[in-house]
Amino acid sequence: MARLKNALRGHFIQKYEQGQNQPTSDDWLELADYISDISDDTNEETEDIAYYSGDGTPETEVTSVAWGYSVEGTYDSSNPAMKLVESMRLKTGNDRKVWHRVVAADGSKEYVGRATVYGIVAGSGAAGEHEAFNCIIRYDRIPEENILDDDNGNGGEPGE
C-alpha cells in the first residue's frame, strides 16, 4: 500500500461563467505556491431513525454531503489562483462560483465540479508576518469523478 504526501494531491480552480459546461481546457489555476495546508472541510447532515425491523436502536443515515476544502497559506498578489480568489472577496451569488478540480495524489482520478468560494482572506495578520491567505472551496453538488489511470498503470496526465 502506497503512502503519499498531501502535496501530491492537486487542487485547481477556474473562473465559472453562468451556463458554462465543465471546462476541458488547460486554463486551470493551481492552488500550490505558498499554500501550506489544504484540509477537508466537508459538511455532512445526518438523521437518526429507528425502524421496527430492528431492535429500536437508531441508525444514522447520511442525508447530504457537501464536500469542501479549507485552504491556508501566504498571500501572493502575483499568483493567478490567489488573484482569482481575492477578486471575489466583495462579490456575492454567482460571482463567488468557480470550477474546482481535485486530482488524487496517485494521479488515478480527478473530481471536477462547480463550487462556491467563501471565508476569503487575502492579506491579514501581524505586522511582522507575511500576509495570510485563506478560503473555503465547497462543491455545490457531488462532483464528477473521472478515472485518469487504467489497471495496467498506464496513467495519463490529469485531464487526458
Image: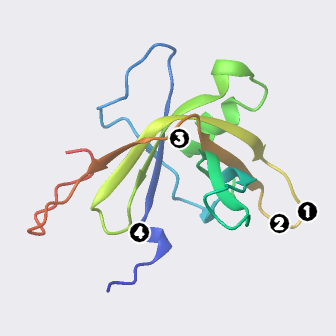
> Which quadrant of the figure contains the N terminus?
bottom left
4 over 127 or under it: above or below: below
Q: How many callouts does the rendering have?
A: 4
Type of amino acid under label 1: Ala
- Residue 49's spot in the image, x, y percent? 72, 53
Q: Residues within 10 Å of mark 3 (few under 14, many from 20)?
A: some
Q: Are marks 2 and 1 in contact (CB under 8 Å)?
A: yes
> Which residue is painted at 67% across and 56% down in the image?
52
Q: Is residue 45 left or right of residue 62?
A: right
Give the residue number, with chain letter if any, for mark 2. 129
Q: Earlier in the sequence, mark 3 or mark 2?
A: 3
Q: Earlier in the sequence, mark 3 or mark 4?
A: 4
34 over 29 or under it: above or below: below
2 over 34 or under it: above or below: below
Type of amino acid under label 4: Leu
Circle 1: element type: loop
Query: Which mark identifies residue 80?
Result: 3
Question: Gap between marks 4 and 1, in whole Å?
Answer: 30 Å
Circle 2: element type: loop
Q: Residues within 10 Å of mark 4 (few under 14, many from 20)?
A: few
Give the residue number, with chain letter if any, for mark 4. 8
Nearer-the-camera pick, 49 or 121: 49
- Number of the front mark, 4 or 2: 4
Question: Gap between marks 4 and 2, in whole Å?
Answer: 27 Å
> Which quadrant of the figure contains the C terminus?
top left
Give the residue number, with chain letter if any, for mark 1. 126
- Residue 57's spot in the image, x, y percent? 73, 67
